[in-house]
Amino acid sequence: MYYPMFYFDPTYIFVLVGLIICLAASAKMRSTFSKYSRVRNHWGMTGREAAEQVLHRAGIYDVRVEHISGNLTDHYDPRSKVLRLSDATYNSTSVAAVGVAAHECGHAVQHATGYVPLKLRSSLVPAANFGSSIAWPLILIGLLINGQSSALFLNLGILAFSLAVLFQIVTLPVEFNASSRALHLLSGNGMLYEDEVRSVRKVLTAAALTYVAGAASAILQLLRIIVLSNSRRR
């Protein structure tokens, strides 16, 4: 009896490596946050109180601090000037919560001071969203058809996905800078002791690794698309 062999696409190695990197970074973030979410800061500040203090000490008084449901869904919305803190941050008095709140304040400070990479990232959002949604349909069409049109669709797909990759890359300095600002504001204003600042640094470093992993995964995916495209052309 004949059993057909299943085709193995060697480019899946790019997907696998990217997945492993993202899972490892996510696990590191969860374990680090969990560890320091059990350490109470010496002032007993909640994430909300820490955010308000950091914003005011940075001279920002027009940003509201609000609660948002979910776990680690914290973010700063520059359009409405609202800093939203999640369940794990808003009312928590942990060192981890203060660190996350201060990091989001770092984005508010970036917005207030016109930080260029933040402006660039914001301008890339529409293009990145469109690129990530249209890239694979274009690539699949290019892989399925023949002739010159195939190359056109493949190139358009690569270009579209490159916009999403560019967004991931631009995100890195924005996140690193926000963490740097957070650590400076927390230590410079005496809001945390030195050992607490070190703990916050570990939490924010673990969080930064998730963005690095996301960028690495996107780059690997782009490399896979390019390899598939070149193989199709040959």
Image: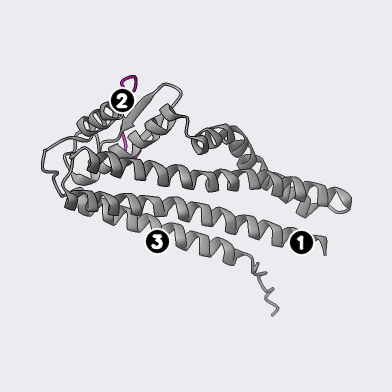
Three-letter residue code for mark 2: Gly
Three-letter residue code for mark 3: Ala
Which label's residue is closer to the chain start, 3 or 2?
3
Q: Nearer the viewer, mark 2 or mark 1?
A: 2
Mark pair 3, 2: CA separation: 38 Å
Secondary structure at badge 2 equals loop
Residue stretch in magenta: 60-74
- Relative to 130, is 207 above or below? below
Of residues 188 and 223, the one drawn nearer to the viewer in this rendering: 188
Which label's residue is closer to the chain start, 3 or 1?
3
Circles 3 and 2: CB distance less than 8 Å? Answer: no
- Relative to 102, is 214 above or below? below
**Which quarter of the rendering shows the N terminus?**
bottom right
For image coordinates 63% across by 43% down, the residue present is 163
Residue reaching furthest to the top: 62
Residue picked out by circle 2:
59
Whether residue 146 sits left or right of residue 128 in the image: it is right
Residue picked out by circle 3:
24
Circle number at residue 106? none
Of residues 58 and 207, the one drawn nearer to the viewer in this rendering: 58
Whether residue 76 sits left or right of residue 152 in the image: it is left
- Relative to 81, is 138 above or below? below
Total residue callouts: 3
Residue picked out by circle 1:
230
Q: Is residue 68 magenta?
A: yes
Residue 124 image position (x, y, % from top left): 58, 36
Secondary structure at badge 3 equals helix
Q: Is residue 167 magenta?
A: no
Of residues 15 and 105, the one drawn nearer to the viewer in this rendering: 105
- Relative to 2, is 160 above or below? above
Residue 191 image position (x, y, % from top left): 18, 39
